[in-house]
Image: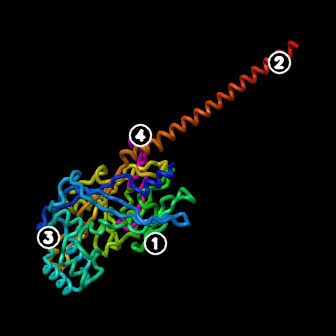
């Protein structure tokens, strides 16, 4: 029963998933260029329904199965605060990111780069609609770079923060079916043919650990962890047990990110392989993002070095809104409630020769944060509750009932046998 349900839920994910996106709208662009502290205001959420479809499912003789998972995003106005036509201002990654990437080039070349930005009317900040920032906008600079410096940018069409995500797949996953060993079910065997990555500096950081992040092996304990590989974060991550809970009568374990997840190498030695590092709470993903100075963190720098909050005004971290968690049914390894929250940040600073950077102070600037969430509800929840909570409970009671019935039968049989022996003994004496 568990195997049938597990495969069905894995193949056709019955849970509606949503991606909620929040922008950090810049309030003081002129002051930032003068070297003052950035002030931001959170805008959103802009909510998108995420559709997931597995394709090219192929089973192999070594108890593995490979597949590609395709994803699409559709805007949900009724769940959003605002519309995709809303205009927000964020840092221009094409300018401020490129400035940091190219700061070691000779000064005359930096002047030439600055002149190129001016030719294409690219400034330090973008003032565009949510739709343009999310899914892409036309840029003469992007067309120019793709023509004369092919491979420098991750996209050849419109430039947007999530332009690579929509109508795309997460790569070719090969995972264990658990047929030979149930403890290995859902664990990743390879990704795009790789059993390890090449982005990081140590074998430990390059390891592809855990599952693909949708299900885990059954029979979990409070000592278990939730390891999974995220292609979008370019690394494996591991969540730890926090507490027990109940969701609509179904028992669960809540797993959360440990404080060491994005700690730097100084605070947590095993993370040295993810460096060059900055403050704790930041993951440097430049090595898998075309050397762009991008950092991933928890939203609002939750669980990060407090100094990051001092550099930017308008951030208010707290666990309820900004901590990530996965609620798991421990017996089956099936997630009941998921909320993965991450923030994208840009490292920016003044670069001499590139006048667009003005007098910008060195800062890790938050741009957006997003939450991918979903929870079991409706008919699937009833089926889950019936098959994996009620039926096992009934069977357990029936098991004890049969034991009691068996014991009662033995006792009654013993009493009847004793009674018959007494009767025969009396009969024998009378004779």
- Spatial distance from mark 4 to mark 3, Cα to Cα? 55 Å
Q: Check if residue 50 falls in the magenta segment.
A: no
Judged by depth in the image, the label closer to the viewer, 3 or 1, is: 1
Question: Where on the picture, by quarter, is residue 263?
Answer: bottom left
- Spatial distance from mark 1 to mark 2, Cα to Cα? 82 Å
Along the polypeptide, which appears first: circle 4 or circle 3? 3
- Spatial distance from mark 3 to mark 2, Cα to Cα? 110 Å
Marking on residue 65: none
Residue furthest to the top in view is 430
- Spatial distance from mark 1 to mark 4, Cα to Cα? 41 Å
Judged by depth in the image, the label closer to the viewer, 3 or 2, is: 2
Quick one: 379 or 416, which is closer to the camera? 379
Which residue is label 2 attached to?
A: 425
Please state the horizontal and vertical placement of residue 373, each as a whole percent of the image: 33, 54
Along the polypeptide, which appears first: circle 3 or circle 2? 3
Please state the horizontal and vertical placement of residue 370, each as a whole percent of the image: 28, 59
Segment tinted magenta in the rendering: 232-256
Along the polypeptide, which appears first: circle 3 or circle 1? 3
Which residue is label 4 attached to?
A: 249
Which residue is label 1 attached to?
A: 194
Q: Vertically, is 421 above or below 180?
A: above
Q: Secondary structure at mark 3?
A: helix
Which residue is label 3 attached to?
A: 33
Q: Vertically, is 98 above or below 49?
A: below
In this orientation, does residue 70 appear?
A: yes
What residue is shown at x 39% (from left), y 73% (from top)?
199
Q: Secondary structure at mark 1?
A: loop
């Amino acid at each position: 029963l568990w195997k049938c349900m597990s495969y069905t839920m894995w193949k056709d994910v019955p849970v509606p998933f949503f991606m909620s996106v929040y922008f950090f709208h810049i309030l003081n662009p002129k002051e930032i260029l003068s070297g003052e502290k950035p002030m931001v205001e959170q805008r959103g959420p802009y909510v998108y329904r995420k559709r997931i479809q597995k394709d090219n499912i192929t089973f192999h003789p070594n108890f593995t199965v490979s597949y590609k998972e395709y994803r699409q995003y559709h805007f949900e106005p009724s769940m959003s605060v605002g519309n995709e036509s809303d205009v927000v201002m964020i840092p221009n990654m094409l300018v401020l990111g490129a400035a940091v990437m190219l700061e070691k080039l000779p000064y005359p070349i930096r002047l030439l780069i600055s002149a190129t930005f001016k030719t294409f009317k690219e400034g330090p900040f973008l003032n565009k609609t949510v739709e343009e920032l999310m899914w892409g906008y036309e840029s003469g600079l992007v067309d120019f770079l793709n023509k004369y410096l092919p491979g420098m940018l991750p996209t050849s069409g419109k430039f947007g923060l999530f332009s690579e995500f929509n109508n795309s797949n997460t790569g070719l996953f090969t995972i264990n079916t658990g047929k030979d060993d149930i403890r290995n079910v859902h664990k990743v065997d390879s990704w795009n043919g790789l059993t390890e990555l090449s982005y990081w500096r140590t074998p430990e950081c390059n390891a592809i650990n855990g599952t693909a992040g949708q299900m885990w092996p059954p029979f979990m304990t409070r000592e278990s962890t939730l390891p999974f590989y995220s292609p979008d974060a370019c690394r494996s991550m591991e969540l730890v047990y926090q507490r027990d809970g109940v969701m609509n009568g179904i028992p669960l374990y809540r797993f959360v990110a440990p404080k060491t997840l994005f700690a730097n190498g100084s605070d947590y030695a095993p993370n040295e392989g993810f460096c060059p590092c900055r403050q704790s709470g930041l993951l440097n993903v430049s090595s898998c993002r075309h050397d762009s100075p991008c950092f991933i963190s928890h939203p609002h720098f939750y669980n990060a070095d407090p100094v990051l909050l001092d550099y930017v005004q308008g951030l208010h971290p707290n666990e309820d809104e900004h901590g990530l968690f996965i609620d798991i049914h421990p017996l089956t390894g099936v997630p009941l409630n998921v909320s993965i929250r991450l923030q994208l940040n840009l490292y920016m600073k003044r670069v001499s020769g590139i006048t667009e950077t003005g007098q910008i102070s060195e800062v890790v600037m938050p741009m957006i944060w997003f939450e991918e969430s979903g929870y079991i509800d409706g008919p699937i929840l009833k089926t889950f509750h019936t098959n994996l909570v009620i039926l096992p409970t009934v069977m357990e009671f029936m098991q004890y009932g049969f034991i009691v019935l068996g014991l009662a039968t033995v006792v009654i049989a013993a009493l009847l046998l004793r009674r018959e022996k007494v009767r025969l003994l009396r009969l024998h004496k009378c004779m």
